[in-house]
Amino acid sequence: AQKVTQAQTEISVVEKEDVTLDCVYETRDTTYYLFWYKQPPSGELVFLIRRNSFDEQNEISGRYSWNFQKSTSSFNFTITASQVVDSAVYFCALSESPKTSYDKVIFGPGTSLSVIP
Amino acid sequence: ETGVTQTPRHLVMGMTNKKSLKCEQHLGHNAMYWYKQSAKKPLELMFVYSLEERVENNSVPSRFSPECPNSSHLFLHLHTLQPEDSALYLCASSPGVGQLNTEAFFGQGTRLTVV
Protein backbone atom coordinates (compact mmCIF):
# COMPACT_ATOMS: atom_id res chain seq x y z
CA ALA A 1 0.00 0.00 0.00
CA GLN A 2 1.04 3.57 -0.54
CA LYS A 3 2.13 5.68 2.39
CA VAL A 4 3.84 9.02 2.82
CA THR A 5 5.44 10.00 6.11
CA GLN A 6 6.55 13.46 7.12
CA ALA A 7 7.98 12.98 10.56
CA GLN A 8 8.37 16.68 11.30
CA THR A 9 5.04 18.10 12.34
CA GLU A 10 6.26 21.64 13.00
CA ILE A 11 9.57 23.38 12.39
CA SER A 12 10.62 26.89 13.38
CA VAL A 13 13.70 28.57 11.99
CA VAL A 14 15.10 32.06 12.08
CA GLU A 15 15.15 33.94 8.81
CA LYS A 16 18.16 33.19 6.60
CA GLU A 17 18.69 29.77 8.13
CA ASP A 18 18.58 26.69 5.91
CA VAL A 19 15.90 24.12 6.65
CA THR A 20 15.26 20.59 5.37
CA LEU A 21 11.84 19.00 5.33
CA ASP A 22 11.87 15.21 5.38
CA CYS A 23 9.66 12.90 3.35
CA VAL A 24 9.72 9.11 3.37
CA TYR A 25 7.41 7.09 1.17
CA GLU A 26 6.29 3.50 0.71
CA THR A 27 5.13 1.92 -2.51
CA ARG A 28 5.28 -1.46 -4.21
CA ASP A 29 5.32 0.03 -7.68
CA THR A 30 8.53 0.56 -9.60
CA THR A 31 7.01 3.49 -11.47
CA TYR A 32 5.70 6.32 -9.37
CA TYR A 33 5.74 10.07 -8.99
CA LEU A 34 6.60 12.24 -6.03
CA PHE A 35 5.42 15.78 -5.43
CA TRP A 36 5.89 18.65 -3.05
CA TYR A 37 3.12 21.17 -2.49
CA LYS A 38 3.10 24.36 -0.41
CA GLN A 39 -0.01 25.51 1.46
CA PRO A 40 0.28 29.16 2.53
CA PRO A 41 -2.18 30.64 5.04
CA SER A 42 -4.53 31.51 2.17
CA GLY A 43 -5.36 27.82 1.88
CA GLU A 44 -4.68 26.68 -1.66
CA LEU A 45 -2.04 24.08 -2.39
CA VAL A 46 0.69 25.36 -4.67
CA PHE A 47 2.61 22.85 -6.75
CA LEU A 48 6.39 23.00 -6.28
CA ILE A 49 7.88 19.95 -7.97
CA ARG A 50 7.15 16.56 -9.53
CA ARG A 51 9.74 13.83 -9.80
CA ASN A 52 9.35 10.42 -11.44
CA SER A 53 10.89 7.31 -9.97
CA PHE A 54 13.41 6.91 -12.76
CA ASP A 55 14.98 10.30 -12.32
CA GLU A 56 17.15 10.43 -9.21
CA GLN A 57 18.94 13.59 -10.13
CA ASN A 58 18.71 16.24 -7.48
CA GLU A 59 17.02 19.44 -8.51
CA ILE A 60 17.60 23.04 -7.58
CA SER A 61 15.23 25.89 -8.23
CA GLY A 62 16.39 29.15 -6.73
CA ARG A 63 16.47 28.72 -2.96
CA TYR A 64 14.69 25.37 -3.18
CA SER A 65 16.38 22.03 -3.69
CA TRP A 66 15.21 18.45 -3.60
CA ASN A 67 17.15 15.29 -2.77
CA PHE A 68 15.58 12.09 -4.10
CA GLN A 69 17.11 8.83 -2.86
CA LYS A 70 15.40 5.61 -3.90
CA SER A 71 17.68 3.55 -1.67
CA THR A 72 16.14 5.15 1.39
CA SER A 73 12.74 5.94 -0.16
CA SER A 74 13.19 9.58 0.68
CA PHE A 75 12.43 12.80 -1.13
CA ASN A 76 13.67 15.62 1.07
CA PHE A 77 13.16 19.30 0.46
CA THR A 78 15.64 22.00 1.47
CA ILE A 79 15.04 25.73 1.60
CA THR A 80 18.22 27.76 1.64
CA ALA A 81 18.34 31.17 3.30
CA SER A 82 14.74 30.92 4.46
CA GLN A 83 12.43 33.91 4.31
CA VAL A 84 9.28 34.82 6.18
CA VAL A 85 7.26 34.20 3.00
CA ASP A 86 8.32 30.56 3.18
CA SER A 87 6.12 30.11 6.25
CA ALA A 88 3.51 27.56 5.21
CA VAL A 89 2.53 23.93 5.48
CA TYR A 90 4.45 21.74 3.07
CA PHE A 91 3.06 18.46 1.80
CA CYS A 92 4.91 15.61 0.22
CA ALA A 93 2.79 13.37 -2.00
CA LEU A 94 3.01 10.12 -3.97
CA SER A 95 1.22 8.92 -7.07
CA GLU A 96 1.74 5.41 -8.37
CA SER A 97 1.93 4.23 -11.96
CA PRO A 98 -1.32 5.14 -13.65
CA LYS A 99 -3.90 2.41 -13.57
CA THR A 100 -6.85 4.68 -14.04
CA SER A 101 -7.81 7.74 -16.01
CA TYR A 102 -6.90 10.17 -13.24
CA ASP A 103 -4.20 10.82 -10.71
CA LYS A 104 -4.66 9.19 -7.34
CA VAL A 105 -2.32 11.12 -5.14
CA ILE A 106 -1.62 10.22 -1.53
CA PHE A 107 -0.53 13.13 0.64
CA GLY A 108 1.66 13.08 3.71
CA PRO A 109 0.43 14.75 6.90
CA GLY A 110 2.35 17.93 6.17
CA THR A 111 5.08 19.89 7.92
CA SER A 112 4.26 23.34 9.24
CA LEU A 113 7.21 25.66 8.74
CA SER A 114 7.46 28.95 10.59
CA VAL A 115 10.20 31.36 9.61
CA ILE A 116 10.79 33.93 12.31
CA PRO A 117 12.11 37.34 11.31
CA GLU B 1 -4.07 32.58 -9.42
CA THR B 2 -4.12 28.83 -9.90
CA GLY B 3 -6.90 28.58 -12.45
CA VAL B 4 -9.19 26.77 -10.02
CA THR B 5 -11.78 28.92 -8.27
CA GLN B 6 -13.83 27.84 -5.30
CA THR B 7 -16.85 29.59 -3.83
CA PRO B 8 -17.67 30.45 -1.19
CA ARG B 9 -14.38 30.89 0.64
CA HIS B 10 -16.06 30.58 4.02
CA LEU B 11 -19.35 28.94 4.98
CA VAL B 12 -21.09 28.52 8.30
CA MET B 13 -24.11 26.26 8.29
CA GLY B 14 -26.42 24.60 10.73
CA MET B 15 -26.85 20.87 10.86
CA THR B 16 -30.26 21.04 9.18
CA ASN B 17 -29.20 23.34 6.34
CA LYS B 18 -28.59 22.48 2.71
CA LYS B 19 -25.76 24.24 0.96
CA SER B 20 -23.48 23.70 -2.03
CA LEU B 21 -19.80 24.28 -2.66
CA LYS B 22 -18.77 25.27 -6.16
CA CYS B 23 -15.55 24.70 -8.03
CA GLU B 24 -14.68 26.02 -11.45
CA GLN B 25 -11.65 25.48 -13.67
CA HIS B 26 -10.87 26.81 -17.12
CA LEU B 27 -7.63 24.95 -17.62
CA GLY B 28 -9.06 22.42 -20.03
CA HIS B 29 -8.53 19.66 -17.51
CA ASN B 30 -10.48 16.42 -17.67
CA ALA B 31 -10.28 15.29 -14.04
CA MET B 32 -11.63 17.08 -10.98
CA TYR B 33 -11.34 16.19 -7.32
CA TRP B 34 -12.78 17.00 -3.92
CA TYR B 35 -10.47 16.73 -0.94
CA LYS B 36 -11.22 17.24 2.74
CA GLN B 37 -8.61 18.72 5.03
CA SER B 38 -9.38 18.41 8.71
CA ALA B 39 -7.19 19.74 11.48
CA LYS B 40 -4.32 17.41 12.36
CA LYS B 41 -5.23 14.95 9.59
CA PRO B 42 -3.80 14.25 6.13
CA LEU B 43 -5.66 15.41 3.08
CA GLU B 44 -8.45 12.94 2.32
CA LEU B 45 -9.58 12.28 -1.21
CA MET B 46 -13.39 12.30 -1.29
CA PHE B 47 -14.48 12.12 -4.92
CA VAL B 48 -12.95 12.04 -8.37
CA TYR B 49 -14.59 12.84 -11.66
CA SER B 50 -12.97 12.00 -14.95
CA LEU B 51 -14.64 13.33 -18.09
CA GLU B 52 -17.69 14.22 -16.00
CA GLU B 53 -18.09 10.66 -14.77
CA ARG B 54 -17.61 9.83 -11.10
CA VAL B 55 -14.76 7.34 -10.94
CA GLU B 56 -14.04 7.22 -7.25
CA ASN B 57 -16.00 7.62 -4.07
CA ASN B 58 -13.89 6.99 -1.00
CA SER B 59 -16.58 5.81 1.42
CA VAL B 60 -17.89 9.31 1.86
CA PRO B 61 -21.17 9.63 3.81
CA SER B 62 -24.24 10.27 1.71
CA ARG B 63 -24.73 13.67 3.32
CA PHE B 64 -22.05 14.75 0.82
CA SER B 65 -23.29 14.59 -2.77
CA PRO B 66 -21.04 15.61 -5.67
CA GLU B 67 -22.18 16.80 -9.05
CA CYS B 68 -20.19 17.42 -12.21
CA PRO B 69 -22.44 18.99 -14.86
CA ASN B 70 -19.58 19.63 -17.27
CA SER B 71 -15.81 19.37 -17.37
CA SER B 72 -15.33 22.89 -15.98
CA HIS B 73 -17.61 22.74 -12.96
CA LEU B 74 -17.80 20.59 -9.88
CA PHE B 75 -20.22 20.94 -6.99
CA LEU B 76 -20.41 19.42 -3.54
CA HIS B 77 -23.94 19.44 -2.16
CA LEU B 78 -24.16 19.35 1.61
CA HIS B 79 -27.14 18.18 3.64
CA THR B 80 -27.63 17.51 7.37
CA LEU B 81 -23.96 17.74 8.17
CA GLN B 82 -22.37 17.02 11.53
CA PRO B 83 -19.96 19.24 13.48
CA GLU B 84 -17.13 16.84 12.68
CA ASP B 85 -17.61 17.71 9.00
CA SER B 86 -16.13 21.14 9.71
CA ALA B 87 -12.98 21.33 7.62
CA LEU B 88 -11.31 22.95 4.64
CA TYR B 89 -12.71 21.48 1.42
CA LEU B 90 -10.32 21.69 -1.47
CA CYS B 91 -11.11 21.25 -5.13
CA ALA B 92 -8.44 20.27 -7.62
CA SER B 93 -8.16 19.53 -11.30
CA SER B 94 -5.59 17.75 -13.42
CA PRO B 95 -5.23 17.00 -17.11
CA GLY B 96 -6.45 13.47 -16.43
CA VAL B 97 -7.26 11.19 -19.31
CA GLY B 98 -4.40 10.81 -21.72
CA GLN B 99 -2.09 13.04 -19.73
CA LEU B 100 -1.47 11.10 -16.60
CA ASN B 101 0.52 11.95 -13.56
CA THR B 102 0.96 15.63 -14.06
CA GLU B 103 0.41 17.87 -11.14
CA ALA B 104 -2.99 18.78 -9.82
CA PHE B 105 -3.98 22.43 -9.50
CA PHE B 106 -5.82 23.30 -6.32
CA GLY B 107 -8.33 25.97 -5.48
CA GLN B 108 -8.10 28.10 -2.35
CA GLY B 109 -10.64 25.97 -0.56
CA THR B 110 -13.88 26.55 1.28
CA ARG B 111 -13.57 26.76 5.05
CA LEU B 112 -16.73 25.05 6.30
CA THR B 113 -17.97 25.32 9.86
CA VAL B 114 -20.96 23.26 10.94
CA VAL B 115 -22.73 24.57 14.04
Image (spheres, rainbow, N blue to C red):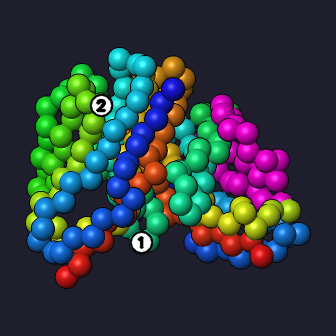
Residue lying at 42% horizontally and 25% vertically, measured from the top left: A27
Judging by the rendered image, the residue that carries numbered circle 2 is: A73
Q: Residue furthest bottom?
A: A117
In this rendering, the answer to whether A94 lies above or below A1 is: below
In this rendering, the answer to whether B28 lies above or below A52 is: below
Residue B8 x %, y %: 62, 70
Left or right: B109 as drawn, with respect to B62: left
Q: Which residue lies furthest to the right in this view?
A: B16
- How packed mark 1 is, by other alpha carbons closer than 10 Å (few <14, some 14-19, many 20 or more), is few
Q: Does the magenta stretch include residue A1?
A: no
Residue A73 visible in this rendered orientation of the protein: yes
Q: Which amino acid does label 1 sit on?
A: Pro
Q: Which amino acid does label 2 sit on?
A: Ser
Residue A34 x %, y %: 34, 36
Q: What stretch is highlighted in magenta?
A: B54-79
Judging by the rendered image, the residue that carries numbered circle 1 is: A41
Residue lying at 61% horizontally and 74% vertically, measured from the top left: B10
Residue lying at 74% horizontally and 71% vertically, measured from the top left: B114
Residue B20 x %, y %: 74, 62
Chain letter of mark 1 equals: A
Q: Dominant secondary structure of the magenta stretch? A: strand
Closer-to-camera residue (A45/B83): B83
Residue B86 x %, y %: 68, 66
To the question of a shared chain for discs 2 and 1, the answer is: yes
* Dot 2: element: loop
Q: Does the magenta stretch include residue B65?
A: yes
- How packed mark 2 is, by other alpha carbons closer than 10 Å (few <14, some 14-19, many 20 or more), is some
Residue B7 visible in this rendered orientation of the protein: no
Chain letter of mark 2 equals: A
